[in-house]
Image (spheres, helix red, strand yellow):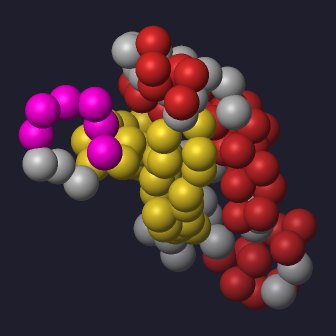
Amino acid sequence: MNNSYIFLKDIRFFAYHGVAPQETMIGNEFRVSLRLKVDLAHAAETDEVADTVSYADVYEAMKAEMEIPSKLLEHVCGRIVKRLFREFPTIEEVEIKLSKRNPPMSADIDCAGVEMHCTKN
């Protein structure tokens, strides 16, 4: 299984990210989706959680980073990616999408955000 992935889709967080002062005081709803490239061949044979990356543990790492206020979503994504590579050495690539619901701009828009695709060096 050369191309196998673990994913978490549309996880909702309430957090305090943003450039405008009201964003860091009032907060907003954010959504995060992750796609993690991981070799799942061994876990597919053994049926043991120790042989894979636990998405529950990934969620806890992501939640901890979302709780740290940042001005830029790019910064939040960068922190999440670094932490995942550090804490889960079998992750080869991370695709992350982070969006802010109802961003403070004069547009009829559901959300705005960033996407990053990072490969472990």
Instruction: Residue at 85% x, 73% y: name it.
Output: 49
Instruction: Residue at 10% x, 40% y: name it.
Output: 107
**8 vs 99: above or below:** below
Residue 73's spot in the image, x, y percent? 42, 28
Instruction: Residue at 52% x, 75% y: name it.
Output: 1
Instruction: Tell me which secondary structure the magenta stretch mostly adopts.
Output: loop
Looking at the rendering, the stretch of residues picked out in magenta corresponds to 102-107
Nearer to us in this view, 107 or 64: 107
Left or right of residue 107: residue 55:
right
Residue 84 image-quadrant placement: top right
Nearer to us in this view, 110 or 32: 110
Nearer to us in this view, 25 or 93: 25
Instruction: Residue at 47% x, 47% y: name it.
Output: 30
Please check the rendered image and state whether residue 45 is part of the magenta-colored stretch, yes or no.
no
Residue 120's spot in the image, x, y percent? 53, 34
Residue 61's spot in the image, x, y percent? 74, 43
Residue 82's spot in the image, x, y percent? 61, 28
Nearer to us in this view, 26 or 6: 26
Q: How many marks?
A: 0
**97 vs 52: above or below:** above
